[in-house]
Amino acid sequence: MTTSGNNQQPPIQANGAKPSRGLFSNILGDFFGGTAAMLVALPSAIAFGLIIYAPLGAEFSSRAAIGGIVGTIALGLFASIFGGTKNLVSAPCAPAAAVLSVFVADLVHSGSIPSDAVVVYIALVSFLAGIVQLVAGNLGGGKFIKYIPYPVVAGYLSAVGILIIIGQVPKFFGIPKGVVFWNGLMNIGLWKWESLFVGMCTVGGMLVAPKLTKTIPASILALIIGVIAYFGAGLIDSALLTLNNNHFVIGQIAVSMSNLYDAFVKQWSSLALISPSIIGQMIAPVFTLAILLSIDTLKTCVVLDAITQSRHNSNRELIGQGIGNMVSASLCGIPGAGTMGATIVNINSGAQTKLSGMVVGLTALLVLLLLGNFIAWIPVAALAGILIVVGYRMVDKKSFALLKHRSTRFDFFVILAVIITAVSTDLLIASGVGIIFAIILFLREQMRSSVIRKKFRGNEIFSKKVRPADEVAILEKHGEESIVLQLQGQLFFGTTDQLLNEIEPYLSKCRYILLDMRRVQSVDYTAAHLLEQIHSRLKKNNGYLIFASVPLSLPTGQNVRKYLKNLGVVEAEDLKFFDDIDSAVEWIEEQVLRTENADRHKAERILDLAEIELFNGFSNEALTKIAGSLTEKSYNAGDKIFGIDVAEEFPDEMFFIKKGTVKIMLPLHGGASYHIVSFTRGGFFGDMSFLDRGKRSANAVAADDVILYILSRKEFDRITEQNPEIAGKFFERMALVISHRLRQNNIELKALQEN
């Protein structure tokens, strides 16, 4: 099947990313996509500029419109060139308008700063926010911004939406500037029918347009409807058809290159008016603006990845956004971010490369230079109507569903707290509230997660040392005396109480408490102090606290073993450290066996053939005949007894341990080995090749000095030809011992599945 048209996508590579496309590989599609995206972004950009400059008065409306257009130009060009996401359209956005409008309002209300100086403060905050984004991108901050909890992000964005609605409602109703918000809403006499008529027509266009067509963006149709409604109202009130002293429209815009240059010079010449006392006031809006713009951009990038089946570069995108905002601020523009609506239109219109974002900037420049006189006639109420709908859509209505479930109600109240703080005070304070709640949410999730991954009694988990049946019986009998706890996650002040509650029941019942620390991600002072307390309580009961797999290097750089040592948790007679859990369990087993049967473990005695577990119950006559076919051999610690890569004269030999311990190791790639099992005195190994006469499947290595009986299959067959009853007894005993081993394995498997 073949596909055609603008929706055709390039093949996806094996790693999930699309193959690289040249900048000019899709010129026509990128041109149409960028042009359509500009038509979506530009009306909103102008409106956002008006929001920011609104506290300065109507005389700054022209300056505000230019700021929105210049921001679209600068971000479209430079964020696309330096960014890390194809098809992304960057333009002035709602978070920027919300943060900067609050900042400007505070400066104006202070009454000590000239209006011309406020303009340069806007540029400085925008420029510094761009620097923060640039530095964050270079330091790898893109990955951290994505981890801000969603309730905090939802609260921010919902608050921005509500603030936009609150800021635009007076313009929607035509309420004169300076009237208190609620007084204006309650006093119908202050409403202007012209604004209300244009605003309602525009809102209607925003709501109905998507149902009529997907080709033309809703904001464009709504703006056209608003302009038509305005000129329709002009047939009733002829004053609407003049630009002089007309507060219902944006007003005359100076659009020549010389005018733009004059604005640039005037803006930066105002640096002399900067008051050092205001510098500290700029820190909060700078970081709030940088964070919100970054979140807005990366959120759009994630959606874009899903649509295009590609993957963006978060850090590079932050760098591109930072450069774009710095250039925009330098050229009298307002800051912005990657915008969802314009980006979606860009893709659906055929764009496939970064060129489309650059087209957005270039076409916006043409609009500024060639269509400035038309922009002057855009009704303020029409832009207010568009922004009210945009603000409403930013409010996260789905968050109310969080109230249905007890486990998610706190998330809802986090969203609500951020919104209330932003609306009642400002976004700057709300950013602090958001950070506090982000910490609380993190602590809540950590405290919700159990720090105990699994628990095993001593009769549910065994070391890799295969022991005779009588020793296994002893270990099973005394299994309640020990407990193995696999810890996980963060051991810090928020989880220590949970850890103590889990361990406390065993402090008086168990003599051995083993803590497997392999999955622990961090330990703080409170947790270390708790471990000291646990050790002290065990010590009073003659118990032992054992640590296994204590991390020497976590991703955070923490050396947990050294940290515990510095805080007084050090090796002692009743406090032990082991490199792995198997060594620790083996030590506990040896302690239990030594306590139960001290004589047997005082010294490692060399066993006779009759004491080998497999030969229990054999007659003296049978043992004599078997002994005659055995050879005896000694090995030093570290010697290889047999192996996968060792040529053996009799590869079907079976080995019986008179003294010492033998480890069975599985060779891995790169020279590493995995310890499968260990066999001790009285045990046997090599039975697989003895039975099937196949090649060895692992290596056998002497763990210490070892003495072995060796029985070849050839010698065994010779004996059993004359004495078949020996073969029957031999295989019966072998099957019994192996069945005991399997039963023990089943106990462990059951414990693993049930914990």
Image: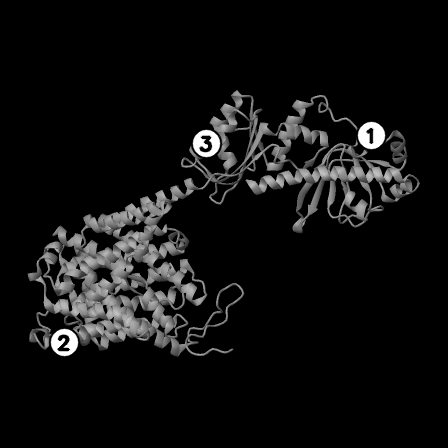
Mark positioned earlier in the residue sequence (2 or 1)? 2
* Residue 312, x across and y down, in percent: 43, 62
At mark 1, the secondary structure is: helix
**Mark drawn on residue 231:** 2
At mark 2, the secondary structure is: helix
Q: Amino acid at mark 1?
A: Ala
At mark 3, the secondary structure is: helix
Q: Which residue is mark 1?
A: 610
Give the side of residue 573 with respect to residue 727, left or right. left
Q: Is residue 597 above or below residue 296?
A: above
Q: Which is more foreground, mark 2 or mark 1?
A: 1
Give the side of residue 619 with respect to residue 430, left or right. right
Q: Residue at x 71, y 42 (%)?
A: 664
Q: Is residue 530 above or below residue 672?
A: above
* Residue 749, x across and y down, in percent: 62, 42
Number of residues whose C-alpha sits closer than 10 Å to that of mark 2, classed few (under 14), some (14–19) or many (20 or more): some
Q: Looking at the image, can residue 525 be seen?
A: no
